[in-house]
Amino acid sequence: MLHSRWFKTAGAAAALTLATATAAYATPAPAPAPDLTAAAVTLRYDDSRAAGWEAAIAAGVANWNASVSNVQLVEAAPGTRAEIQIIATSGWPQATLGPVRPGGTARVELGSQAVTEGHDKTRIAAHELGHSLGLPDTKPGPCSQLMSGSTGGTTCKNATPNATERARVQSLYAGGFTFLVPADGRVLVDAP
């Protein structure tokens, strides 16, 4: 009986030693990754004060919506609140640097002075919306960069963000976590 007790005690001690040794060398489980499958952030825009720019705005919005999946721009119903206010002005285009958040506020001014000098309306609209989504200017830059703005030249008609610009917006709105990224709030004027 004593012999049997000794084996039980020795066996328990060996099991405890093995468990302790294994635990000392075990790697902790990795932290769970954030849920990046959250629904896209929806931002509403109001272009009711942008007469003459409707087609350019619609095309610029369509380009962004086709280019990114983490954020979608939708026209606000009349009388409802919109995060992005779009207005037509006689000056140079300008916009608030985002990323604008749901419930936040950004202003886009589509200036006719740039059109008078020969710049493409759709490129202007898409570029200014890019500011609201958190992209700064990349001046000087080639036509292939939407955020190069006026430095792309008056013959530039590119109104689609390139891969780098798309990736940056995707990261700013990843998993709907835009609330973690403070909006810049500066107003960027796109004069040459």
Image: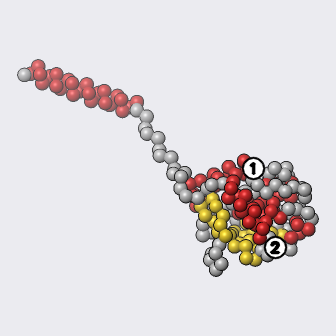
Task: Please give the name of the residue rendered at 81% of the width and 50% of the height, measured from the top-left corner.
Answer: 144
Residue at 90% across, 56% down: 155
Dot 1 lies on which element?
loop
Toward the viewer: 94 or 74? 74
List the single residue furthest toward the top.
3
Mark 1: which amino acid?
A: Asn
Horizontal side of 184 relative to 9 (left or right) equals: right
Separation (CA) of disc 1 from disc 2: 27 Å
**Corner quadrant of residue 178:** bottom right
Q: Residue placed at 71% from the left, 61% from the top?
A: 62
Query: Badge 2, how many Cα within 10 Å: few under 14, some, many 20+?
Result: few
Disc 2 marks a residue whose amino acid type is Gly
Q: Earlier in the sequence, mark 1 or mark 2?
A: 2
Residue 162 numbered mark, or none: 1
> In this picture, is 89 found above or below 37?
below
Q: Is residue 181 visible?
A: no
Image coords of residue 65 (percent x, y): 67, 58
Q: On the rendered structure, is 165 left or right of 37?
A: right
Q: Position of residue 69 (x, y in %)?
A: 63, 55
User: Which quadrant would residue 41 be assigned to in this image?
Assistant: bottom right
* Tag 2 residue: 52
Which quarter of the rendered picture does the C terminus lie within? bottom right
Most distant residue in the left direction: 1
Q: How many marks?
A: 2
Q: Secondary structure at mark 2?
A: loop
Residue sticking out furthest to the bottom: 79
Given contact means CB atoms under 8 Å apart, are the residues at marks 1 and 2 in contact?
no
User: For mark 1, does the 10 Å Cα neighbourhood hold few (<14), some (14 to 19), or many (20 or more) residues?
Assistant: some
Residue at the image point whose x is 55% and y is 58% from the top: 39
Which quadrant would the N terminus be assigned to in this image? top left
Q: Position of residue 77 (x, y in %)?
A: 64, 75
